[in-house]
């Protein structure tokens, strides 16, 4: 039995990529790290995104993707590394505003969120540059152009 990298839940009225698409994007990150892991992805609306963002980040506004790392003891074997909450209406609006194909933006935000789960961040400039380089490299493997270029 093949383990699947993504556990997907979409109870919103919004369309999202298929589990196969999410699997491909997460597997691209897994291949880079050489270790199998799972990610739970919840598709959310703007209201829930805002509630989560306010509760966990102190920002009272919706955001495109939130990452929640799973904090488990080292002696416990667990493939799940954390959860992503991806806000479907924001993903769609941003893709349109930025003139990007919708699936490219979904892929970018998924890769971005998974990198957060693996410990990457973009608070400081050097961290942001490293994270962007990794995102560009991973997305290139998926034949998706650099999301940071106009």
Image (cartoon, rainbow, N blue to C red):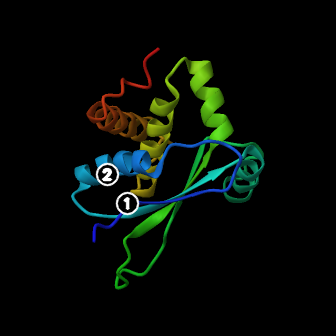
Q: Is residue 134 left or right of residue 117?
A: left
The residue at which mark 2 appears reads as 27
Q: Is residue 80 left or right of residue 16?
A: left
Give how far across and how far down residue 94 sits, in percent.
61, 28
Q: Badge 2: few (under 14), some or many (20 or more) residues near its Cα, within 10 Å?
A: many
Placement of 103 over or under 49, stated as above or below: above
Residue at point 42%, 69% (across, down): 80
Q: Is residue 28 left or right of residue 49?
A: left
Give how far apart the Cα atoms at labels 1 and 2 are: 7 Å
The residue at which mark 1 appears reads as 5
Give how far across and how far down residue 22 sits, in percent.
43, 48
Most foreground residue, 120 or 147:
147
Residue at point 74%, 44% (across, down): 46
Placement of 5 over or under 1, stated as above or below: above
Placement of 94 over or under 45, stated as above or below: above
Residue at point 67%, 53% (across, down): 57
Residue that extends furthest to the bottom in the rendered view of this protein = 75
| Mark 1 touches mark 2? (CB < 8 Å) | yes
Residue at point 46%, 47% (across, down): 121
Q: Quadrant of the N terminus?
A: bottom left
């Amino acid at each position: 039995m093949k383990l699947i990298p993504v556990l997907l839940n979409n109870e919103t009225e919004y369309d999202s990529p298929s589990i196969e698409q999410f699997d491909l994007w997460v597997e691209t990150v897994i291949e880079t790290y050489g270790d199998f892991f799972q990610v739970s992805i919840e598709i959310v609306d703007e209201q829930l995104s805002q509630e989560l963002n306010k509760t966990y980040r102190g920002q009272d506004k919706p955001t495109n993707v939130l990452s929640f790392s799973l904090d488990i003891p080292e002696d416990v074997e667990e493939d799940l590394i954390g959860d992503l909450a991806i806000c479907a209406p924001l993903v769609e609006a941003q893709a349109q505003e930025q003139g990007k194909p919708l699936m490219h933006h979904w892929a970018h935000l998924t890769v971005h969120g998974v990198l957060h789960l693996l410990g990457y961040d973009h608070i400081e400039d050097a961290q942001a540059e490293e994270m962007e380089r990794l995102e560009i490299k991973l997305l290139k493997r998926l034949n998706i152009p650099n999301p940071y270029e106009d």
